[in-house]
Image (tube, rainbow, N blue to C red):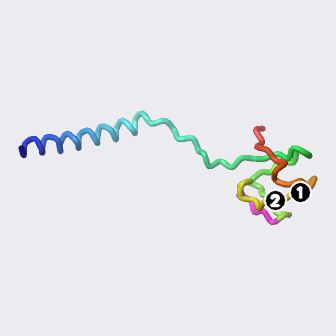
Amino acid sequence: MTTKIVFFFSLKIVLNKYLAICVILFRKPIKNTNVMKKYICTVCEYIYDPEQGDPDSGIEPGTAFEDIPDDWTCPLCGVGKEDFEPYEG
């Protein structure tokens, strides 16, 4: 009985090491999902760039569009956030 326990314990250690090596060798690069998207105003085509923010409106650089207050308006034409869509350009 003890021999079986030792064998299975040793087998588990070997398989865990093998699995770790496989993960390291075969894993795919993880796509960065934290990239902040730019958004474009559908009325005047102003592009909100999160890297620049909107300092004139008190929006600090590095602020994602989703984190901008709901009462924020487009600095060019004055429409609300609901008139923006993700910018793919």
Percent across and percent down for residue 32 are 59, 44
Residue at (75, 59) in percent of width and height: 68
At a point 91% along the width and 56% down the height, the residue shown is 78
What secondary structure is found at the residue carrying circle 1? loop
The residue located at (79%, 44%) in the rendering is 85
Residue type at mark 2 is Asp
Residue to which mark 2 is pinned: 54
Residue 43: x, y in percent?
A: 91, 45
Left or right of 60 in this view: 24: left
Up the image or down, 88 lies above or below 58; here it is above
Question: Secondary structure of the magenta portion, mostly?
Answer: loop
Which amino acid, mark 1? Pro
Query: For this view, does 37 lie left or right of residue 34?
Result: right
The disc at residue 38 is none
Vertical order, 29 against 78 (above or below):
above
- In the picture of the structure, the residue carrying the numbered disc 1 is 75
Secondary structure beneath dot 2 equals: loop
- Foreground residue, 65 or 35? 65
Q: Quadrant of the N terminus?
A: top left
